[in-house]
Amino acid sequence: MELFLTPASISYIAQTIVFLGITIYLILKNNGTKANFWLSVAFSIMVAAGLAGFIGVSSLRFQAEGMLVHDTLLVLGLALLTQFAYNFSTIKLVGEKQAKLILWVNNLLTITAIALSVVYLYPFINHPLIIFVPMIIKILMVLEISWLMIFFIYMTGKLSTLETNKSWFYRFLHPQGRLAIAAQGFGLSFIVLWFFWLLSILLSIYGFNNISFFIFTLVTPWALTFFVIALINQTIRKASFFFKFIIIILLTTFTGISSASWLTAPASAANFFTMFSIPNLHTIHFEQNNAVYEINYSEFIFYEDIGKEITFPEGETTVSEELEFTFPFSGENWESILINKKGFVAFNENPVNLDNLSLPGNPNPIIATLYVKDLMPSENSTVFVNHQDDKTIITWFLASGDPDMDISINTQLILTPVGTFDISYYDVRVFALNDPYIPTEMQQVSGFFLGSNDKFPTRIKFDNQLPLTSINWKGVYQDYYIDFRDHLHWSISMQFIAMLLVSLLMLVLYPILIETSLVKPIQTIRSGISHVVQGDLNVNVEPRFSDDLGQTTYEFNQMVRVLNEKHQNYENHIQDLDEKLHLRNLELQQTLDKLGNEINNRKKLKTYLDKCIQQNKKLEITDELGCNNRTQLLNILEDEIKRAKRYNTTLSFVIVDPDYLRMINDTYGFSTGDEVLNSLVDLLMSNVRETDIVGRIGGEEFAIIMPQTIGEDALIGANRIRNLIGANPVETSKGQIRLSASMGVVEVTKEGVASIDLLLHQANLALETAKKKGRNQAVLYNSSMEKTIT
């Protein structure tokens, strides 16, 4: 790949070196956070972007591709900086949603840029709008940086919490707190970058490519470097001062060298080389011998008999002319030629219209006297042809139709039947504003090219024309632009080497200077401070030099001595106070012991009283068997009736009466009867639902309140409990006793009941009915029982 160093090349190399230094520092001083990881990756991409930009501004062949890859990598780098912003400290407290939105938007823009780049580099879609892809990617860059700029301004205001009543603009300019200051630094860096990138794009749109490149390559490393410095200033990182010092010195030096490169390569230099690289008033002879061309200067000849003027059809620049003889060239004998108005002839059996040369790669064999790519012939430009038996003379009198280009070309081509030809230059003047900053391929061409048979023609310079042999029919053509680039390439190369040498010297000398004059003295002072912090006031720091830091060391030693004296005085005073305090503590300890005993006694008394109160409260609502007493049960029943009415729900009430309990008391004694009742209560309380309430309603009668239960379901539940009573004999001190129970069930209807007494009355009626039916039954109340009992 042919590279020619330009001022923009120097700028991009400087940018690459700076970004590489930042990347290495971030990797070596990694603090283990995701934010640091994404920032390191972002600057790694910036390094790749700088290299792509270097190729773009230095290559004759890959200019568009290099700059497109450069811009695409910058879009990717900005997306990675968005990842850094999303993982920045405290982001979840001040703007996680906003950061996530910007992250997704920038990721989408990055994917779009990459897709457009692929379409542009591999044009499988043939569409005229493809030419706008580079500009679209530049716009995507500005959009990404706009989002980041707005977000960091917003985050600065959110982190400045001391003056929330102030405007966002005020809080951005006056941040409070370490993180707010860091966010402000990020925002200012992106504001500068956004402004100058936008200015650069506008300048390129209006044709000021040189200034656009200069601004872009100058501002980008400065802004992104201060972005990193803003982060370092507000985070704890080793060697941060050393890094900031070196990177600022590098930036300043590189900026000076880059600016000098831009200023020392003006367009006038290009015009100078252009004028003096044309072989004016010369004739170049191309002698064919056995399919080999020998090229040399011959005596200058310019025929005055130029023949007839050629008339070109409107809108065309090529016409076909029949020869008086056959002309052997490129392995064929040609009877006609195609004459182009821009200073060359082509060979093809069929007439074709050729507007521009593209060497190598043109399928037609070509002989060019002097072809200037940017020349648009004026109406006064003429072409003449003179056909003779022994030669054909084609003469071009060309002038530029562009008033900004002073171009005048008078050339002559003489073809002979033996295959030799001459090119004569007469009164040639090319004074065009050739851009010395950005390479452009094939500006001016003179020589011959053998068409599709010629894959690798020889490319030479105008000032290296003598003498040359073209081996094996290999085409030979000249390119002035390469000649000029060599001159500029040499001076820029010297500046490039100087920049590398300065970088190496700075990397070697500055660390030594800083280490001896700054780092070690500061480390000595920090070591002394560390001893003081640990309580060693007898430390004495020895200064290395008698400079400002050495004087600071002397003052530090004096400060430590004063602190040591005061410390001794304080120690003596504290010792006196400590003795007095010890005596006072003994007195207080005795008092505290007495108070402690009193407090313990009061705590024990309070615990006993609380226990008694709890027992009394329990006795108020429960009986000796542990279930609710009659008063508590009726209170609960009243509340449940009200609740059923309010919410229109069902309620059932069950009375349980153990059968033959009096017989058990008479047979086994009252103590055994109490055991039976205890067992019955345990069985009832352990087999009802959590929402059911069990209580004692009389001497040996118990009741169950069943909320949200209809009568039929309550009857089923009562029978289940009744079966459990019958199936589980009671273990007493007198042996096992089988027990059964009769139950009366009543449902509170939606109309409700007049009173609790009426509900108890209905339940007792159902219970009596169960007794009359032979006991060990559960009966649901109905109104017919009133008449039966009566």
Image (cartoon, helix red, strand yellow):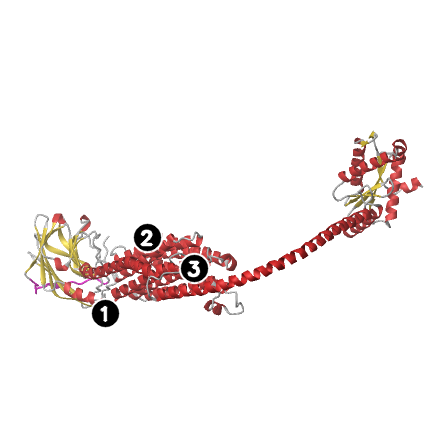
- Residue 193 lies, in percent from the top left, at 38, 64
Residue 466 in view: yes
Q: Which residues are magenta?
A: 300-314
Name the residue rendered at 60%, 60% in the picture: 581
Distance from disc 1 to disc 3, alpha carbons, whole Å, reads: 82 Å
Q: Earlier in the sequence, mark 1 or mark 3?
A: 1
Name the residue rendered at 58%, 59% in the picture: 579
Query: How packed is label 2: few (under 14 Cα within 10 Å), some, or many (20 or more)?
Result: few
Q: Determine the residue located farthest toward the top in the rendered image.
A: 735
Question: Of helix, strand and loop, which one carries label 1?
Answer: loop
User: From the viewer's perspective, is 220 left or right of 285?
Assistant: right
Q: Earlier in the sequence, mark 3 or mark 2?
A: 2
17 and 519: which one is in front? Answer: 519
- Residue 716 lies, in percent from the top left, at 79, 37
The picture quadrant where one finds residue 190 is bottom left
767 and 592: which one is in front? Answer: 592
User: From the viewer's perspective, is 618 left or right of 168?
Assistant: right
Numbered mark located on residue 404 in the image = 1
580 and 145: which one is in front? Answer: 580
The picture quadrant where one finds residue 629 is top right
Numbered mark located on residue 96 in the image = none
Q: Earlier in the sequence, mark 1 or mark 2?
A: 2
Numbered mark located on residue 121 in the image = 2
Q: Amino acid at mark 2?
A: Leu
**What residue sits right under mark 3 in the picture?**
538
Query: How packed is label 3: few (under 14 Cα within 10 Å), some, or many (20 or more)?
Result: few
Q: Amino acid at mark 3?
A: Asn
